[in-house]
Amino acid sequence: MRLLALPLAVLAVTAYHVSSRSLPAKIRADVISSGNWHRGCPVPLSQLRLLGFTYWGFDKHAHTGQIVVNETAVRPLAKVFRRLYAIRFPIRDARLASTYGPARVRVDDATASFECRQAVPSPCTGGTGTGSWSEHAYGEAVDLNPRENPYVGCGMTRDKSALSYLDRSRVRRGMVTPAVVAAFASVGWGWGGSWSGSTKDYMHFSATGH
């Protein structure tokens, strides 16, 4: 029998896999022990979901990623990651342990999702909190490749390893492109890189745009 040769792009889309489920007991425990959820958070653990998806790594191989998000974000983000996989946008690290594992295994350049914390002030002003919940605390935000897409203000960033990425005119692997912005915009999510003024959060996408 003769096999049908499919274009690579078609194969990539066909290979994409997505899943969603309530947080298993072990992951619930990890989210709590890592300090990412605590009493007083604006969403209960029961409202969070474990979203699994296929992504292209910097090594040009397909990997399975997992992030924790609000149940309301599952469907739109499943569509977004399907699109990012189709265009072969590389993600540095989307492993769950890189965010919620022990401190010794956490990775600075991991794509981040749910984290019950305050919004981070602009590098222009300094400080560690704004007094308002971050969109991450609601499980309705994703930080994509933080090193390649830093949070900047007044020409500064807190992440010294990201200094070379302050120049957004030279597009390198993992940097957010118009195609990535369009993927999130297609489900109504906004990008921190389009904020007005000198403060830009190039890694940040959220349901509200904030």
Image (tube, helix red, strand yellow):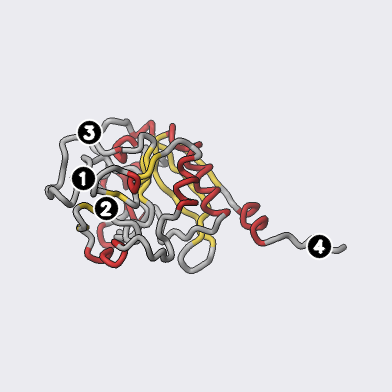
Looking at the rendered image, the quarter that the C terminus falls into is top left
Q: Amino acid at mark 2?
A: Tyr
Nearer the camera: disc 3 or disc 2: 2
Q: Which residue is mark 1?
A: 120
Report the residue at 41% width, 55% height from top: 176
- Label pair 3/4, CB-CB below 8 angstroms: no
Q: Secondary structure at mark 3?
A: loop
Q: Residues within 10 Å of mark 4 (few under 14, many from 20)?
A: few
**Is disc 1 in contact with disc 2, using a CB cutoff of under 8 Å?**
yes
- Residue depicted at x 31% and y 63%: 167
Q: Nearer the viewer, residue 102 or 130?
A: 130
* Residue depth check, mark 1 versus mark 4: number of the one nearer the observer: 1
The residue labelled by disc 3 is 39
Q: What residue is pinned by disc 2? A: 151
Measured Cα–Cα span from mark 3 to mark 4: 56 Å
Q: Earlier in the sequence, mark 1 or mark 2?
A: 1
Side of 14 relative to 50 (left or right): right
The quarter of the image holding the N terminus is bottom right
Q: CA distance from mark 1 to mark 4?
A: 53 Å
Q: Nearer the viewer, residue 153 or 133?
A: 153
**Residue 134 seen in the figure:** yes
| Upstream in sequence: badge 3 or badge 2 | 3
Q: Mark 3: which amino acid?
A: Arg
Where is residue 128? Give x, y as percent: 15, 47
Q: Residues within 10 Å of mark 2 (few under 14, many from 20)?
A: many
